[in-house]
Image (cartoon, helix red, strand yellow):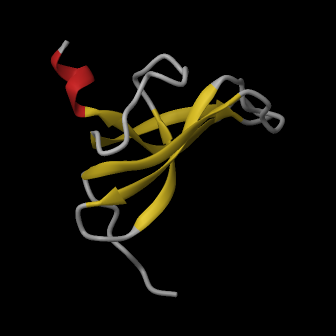
Amino acid sequence: MEEVHIGKYAELVSFAVVRQAPEGFTPPFIQANVKIDEGPVFFSHIDGVVPKEDALRVGQRLRLVIKTIRRDSEDKEILAWAYRPLDEENN
């Protein structure tokens, strides 16, 4: 395993709307495989769109964001990276 820089921009490879989630997460939300411009493909939350099947398209350009995904039992923020569609930022 090697350390990889998480790129600021990526392309959507595939995605699914999550309707049943583990404790601490509120469905529905979108999980996706994204390919960062540096090459690696990895699993990420998608932010900034309504979680439905026609919200995204494969090949869509995405931008990295850092977001609160939930709060722990002490009400502290749990942060994670996510990607947001670039074209959503222009609306």
Picture coordinates of residue 53, whole percent (x, y) = 54, 25
Name, please, the residue furthest toward the bottom.
1
Depth check, front residue: 72 or 53: 53
Depth check, front residue: 42 or 60: 60
Q: Image quarter for residue 7?
A: bottom left
Picture coordinates of residue 81, whole percent (x, y) = 45, 47
Name, please, the residue furthest toward the top.
91
Residue at x 79%, y 31% (from the top left corner):
20
Picture coordinates of residue 61, whole percent (x, y) = 25, 42
Residue at x 37%, y 70% (from the top left corner):
40
Residue at x 34%, y 62% (from the top left corner):
6
Q: Image quarter for residue 49?
A: top left
Is residue 42 shown above or below 86?
below
Count the marks: how many? 0
Depth check, front residue: 33 or 45: 33
Residue at x 49%, y 16% (from the top left corner):
50
Is residue 18 shown above or below 33?
above
